[in-house]
C-alpha cells in the first residue's frame, strides 16, 4: 500500500544536506580557492612565457652549447647542423613548457571545481617547481632567475591558499557531493 500524494515528507532530523536526493545547487567557492586558481593560472602563463622569452633571448648560448657538444663528440659542427639543432632545441623546450602549462591549467580548473585529487596533484607540481628552481636557479641567467623565482613564490602562495581552513572546508563539502 503506497502513501497518498499529500502525505507529509518524513522528518529529516540533523542529517547533512548531501544525504538527500534533492539538488543542492552549486557550492560557493571561497575567496581563497578563487585566488589560488588565479595564482596557478598565472604560474601556467609564466612558465610558458618565461620559456619563450628565454629561448628567444638565449639563442647564442644554445648555439655555443651545441657547438661544444658536437666538438666533444668528434662531430663537425657545420652551420646548417648547428642551426637545425638550435631550432629543434627551442621547439622542444617550448612544446614541453606548453604541456607543463597545460597541466597546471587543467589541474587548476579541477581544483577550482572542488576536486581534492587535483588539489593534491597541483600541490605536487608546486613542489616540483620549487625542486626545479633549487636545482637550476644557480645556473640560470638573470631573466631565467626572475621567472623561476616568481614561479616559486607563486607556487608557495597558491599551495598555502589551497590549504587554508576555508579552502579545506570547501574541498571537504565538494567531496561529499
Image: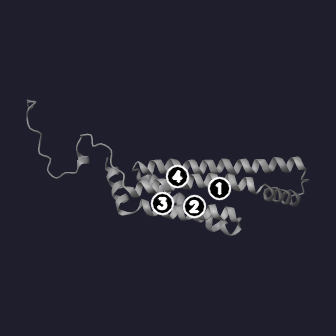
Q: Indicate left or right for 7 with 107 as reference.
A: left
Residue wearing tag 2 = 151
Q: Residue at x 67, y 62 (%)?
A: 144
Residue wearing tag 1 = 50
Q: What is the spatial separation of the Cα atoms under label 4 and label 2, in whole angstroms?
A: 11 Å
Q: What is the spatial separation of the Cα atoms under label 3 and label 4, in whole angstroms?
A: 10 Å
Residue wearing tag 4 = 41
Q: Earlier in the sequence, mark 3 or mark 2?
A: 2
Q: Position of residue 168 (x, y in %)?
A: 36, 59
Q: State yes or no: discs 1 and 4 in contact (Cβ < 8 Å).
A: no
Q: Position of residue 91 (x, y in %)?
A: 72, 47
Q: What is the spatial separation of the Cα atoms under label 3 and label 2, in whole angstroms?
A: 10 Å
Q: Which picture quadrant has residue 22?
A: top left
| Vertical position of residue 95 compared to residue 124: above or below | above
User: Callout 3: helix, strand or loop?
Assistant: helix
Q: State yes or no: discs 1 and 2 in contact (Cβ < 8 Å).
A: yes
Amino acid at each position: 500500500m503506497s502513501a497518498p500524494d499529500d502525505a507529509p515528507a518524513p522528518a529529516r532530523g540533523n542529517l547533512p544536506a548531501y544525504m538527500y536526493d534533492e539538488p543542492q545547487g552549486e557550492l560557493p567557492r571561497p575567496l581563497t580557492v578563487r585566488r589560488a586558481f588565479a595564482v596557478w593560472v598565472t604560474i601556467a602563463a609564466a612558465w610558458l612565457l618565461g620559456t619563450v622569452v628565454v629561448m628567444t633571448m638565449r639563442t647564442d648560448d644554445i648555439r655555443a652549447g651545441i657547438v661544444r657538444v658536437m666538438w666533444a663528440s668528434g662531430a663537425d659542427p657545420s652551420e646548417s647542423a648547428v642551426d637545425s639543432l638550435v631550432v629543434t632545441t627551442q621547439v622542444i623546450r617550448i612544446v614541453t613548457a606548453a604541456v607543463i602549462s597545460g597541466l597546471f591549467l587543467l589541474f587548476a580548473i579541477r581544483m577550482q571545481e572542488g576536486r581534492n585529487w587535483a588539489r593534491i596533484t597541483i600541490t605536487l607540481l608546486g613542489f616540483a617547481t620549487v625542486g626545479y628552481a633549487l636545482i637550476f636557479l644557480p645556473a640560470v641567467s638573470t631573466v631565467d632567475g626572475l621567472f623561476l623565482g616568481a614561479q616559486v613564490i607563486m607556487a608557495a602562495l597558491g599551495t598555502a591558499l589551497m590549504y587554508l581552513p576555508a579552502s579545506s572546508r570547501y574541498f571537504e563539502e565538494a567531496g561529499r557531493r
